[in-house]
Image (cartoon, grey):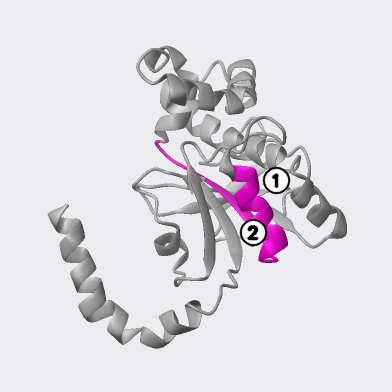
Amino acid sequence: MLKLMQGIHHFQDNLFSSQRELFERLSKGQTPDALFITCSDSRINPNLITQTEPGELFILRNAGNILPPHGAGLGGEEATIEFATVGLGIKDIIVCGHSHCGAVNALLNPEAIRESMPALHRWLSHADATQRIVEGKYQELAPAALLNVAIQENVLVQLENIRTYPAVALGLARGDLKLHGWVYKIETGQVFGYDPRQSQFVSLAESISEAIPPAARLTDAFAI
């Protein structure tokens, strides 16, 4: 806690004063460029990865960047996304997974958390489709490669889930909204985006991020 308190003092005494105009402008409202949905993992910093300032990203985080389908529960995910699209008029939604994801690893090894973390175990049921796809399609892979592909498949599954939200469905039908699937690789700093033309995640440094079509899937050969 001492480190956090010292950080607050540094922010107020140094950073805030040098960007006072920015924060005064932000106090009058927000117009973020995109909704960024990612994992709660402490190693992920969306603003750092995208080099964005306060007010430029509307951020939603939870364990495993999971989006329960419409009607599956009363969590805040759908409400947050509805506010982002309807209330703020956001036109781009990014679902970003990441390497070494503990939630996805738990999804593949549910016995490790069933008793010790029952709430997490129940939450991961919203990614059952990810587990079934991985077990049915990639059984021959070694554990590290299996986790890697599960992280990618989970991004695609959650993009399918988000399409069930009425506000998102309307935006997509009107052509006002675009969905993007990303995976961040912690150890290299690379960000991979799903390319619907190749059915793979490819480096965003080498390609342009495109909107994801319905029922996107990976090819048997995966990129990262």
Which residues are the magenta region? 77-100
The image position of residue 165, as x and y in percent, is: 74, 43
Q: Is residue 175 left or right of residue 155?
A: right
Pointer 2 or 1: first along the chain: 2
Q: Is residue 29 magenta?
A: no
Looking at the rendered structure, the kind of residue marked 2 is: Ala
Task: Give me the residue at 29% from left, 84% from top.
Answer: 17
The image position of residue 153, as x and y in percent, is: 60, 33
The image position of residue 179, as x and y in percent, is: 69, 53
Residue placed under numbered mark 2 in the picture: 84
Task: Give me the residue at 68% from left, 63% from top.
Answer: 87
What SS does tag 1 mark?
loop
What SS does tag 2 mark?
helix
Quadrant in the rendering for residue 15: bottom left
Q: Is residue 207 above or below residue 192?
A: below
Residue placed under numbered mark 1 in the picture: 198
Q: Dot 1: few (<14), some (14–19), or many (≥20) neighbours within 10 Å?
A: few
Q: Is residue 132 above or below residue 18?
A: above
